[in-house]
Image (cartoon, grey):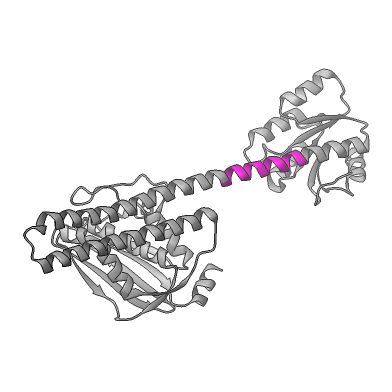
Amino acid sequence: MNYLAEKKSVLIVDDQPQNLQLAATVLNPYYRLLFAHNASLALQAAEEKLPDLILLDIMMPDMSGYEVCILLKENETTKHIPIIFLSAKADEMDILEAYSCGGQDYVTKPFRPKELIARIDAHISLKVQREKIDRMNQELLASNNQRDKLISFISHDLRSSLKSAYELLKSTLEKYANLSQQQQVLQLEKSCGTLAHTLELQMELLTWAKNQLGKRHFHFDYIEIPGTFEKVLHQLQHQLKAKEITVHMEAPSSQLVYGNPTMFNTIMRNLLSNAIKFSKQKSEIVLSFQLIDEFAEISVKDQGVGIANKHFTDLFKADSNFSTQGTHGEKGMGLGLDLCQEFVTKMGGKIWVKSELKKGSQFFFTVPLHPIVMEKTNA
């Protein structure tokens, strides 16, 4: 009996109509049947229909069953389909050749119906289990890749933020003795503020990492644009000061968008950090905002080194090897941009870039204004 949960498909290949009819009578109650009366039709049906199993005769006029089996096993599309030879030839050498060319089993004619069904069930069940294991291996590999990406991303952002906190404290200590008491308090307040932002960033990233690895649902809420801009600028103030870069904000005094706060902050921080890296000394970065239909379009524009058109698509690929240094030798290019794209997509938006070599780059991304827009976009 066939105990599989659903009817699986079996391709029966035989050049004798009476043999096809006999096999169909026995197997029809248990399987979805496909038929081919020669080798050419068998190869075509196997590739187009992808049956769960093939019953293959050996003696056929245009090509032997052995040759058909070899061709099926050499084809990437059909090589995993189990093949049972069903033949009147019972010689030991014939059976050995059937196994050597890739067959999984051999049944002699006249066959016993229950035995044939049992063997078909066994091989289809093995195929189903093998496919399940392959899927699990792929999921495990994807999980490991995601974990590695998370570690790289978190270490990148934390290193950048901790470097800012360290540089501020170092500067404070160097100047501390020459500062007035009021100035000392202000410098310490700035240091505490920077460390507080670093701690907040760490908590954000760890929460996000838990969500990613645990496949939990992300929390979405309304996000204030001006407040986020100010927060990110504060986190990167020392990189800005080191290059004497001014930031011009073209944003309303109050505007809300809908998304995940950690994702949104991370996108802004990465885009602005990259803009700083590739900006020239004493140049300007522009943060702009505009409403387009049901979305907010946000952009970060610099006057830096620019990017060649041929590299645009590589910027957002996790497996891309594209890399270059910043204007002060800063490491990397685009670390986190693939994650920015992932975040923007999860929030229902898009991300893209415009750039010209030696003239600068402008990164754009969109965010929905309301929950219903995000739901429609991700549907």
Q: Is residue 355 visible?
A: no
Q: Main secondary structure of the magenta part?
A: helix
Report the front residue among 177 and 122: 177
> Residue 88: horizontal and vertical position, in percent?
89, 27
> Quadrant of the image for the N terminus?
top right
**Residue at 16 percent of width and 63 percent of height:** 283
> Quadrant of the image for the C terminus?
bottom right
In the image, is residue 266 above or below residue 151?
below
> Residue 143: horizontal and vertical position, in percent?
52, 47
Q: Does the magenta-highlighted stretch encompass residue 62?
A: no
> Residue 171: horizontal and vertical position, in percent?
15, 56
**Residue at 69 percent of width and 30 percent of height:** 70
**Residue at 43 percent of width and 51 percent of height:** 150
In the image, is 364 to the left or to the right of 90?
Answer: left
In the image, is 209 to the left or to the right of 51?
Answer: left
Q: Is residue 265 visible?
A: yes
- Give the image quarter of residue 235: bottom left
Q: Does the magenta-highlighted stretch encompass residue 136?
A: yes
Q: Which residues are magenta?
A: 125-139
Report the front residue among 310 and 6: 6
In the rendered image, the residue lying farthest to the left is 178
> Residue 257: horizontal and vertical position, in percent?
41, 75
In the rendered image, the residue lying farthest to the bottom is 253
**Residue at 44 percent of width and 45 percent of height:** 148
Report the front residue among 327 and 16: 327
In the image, is 76 to the left or to the right of 242?
Answer: right
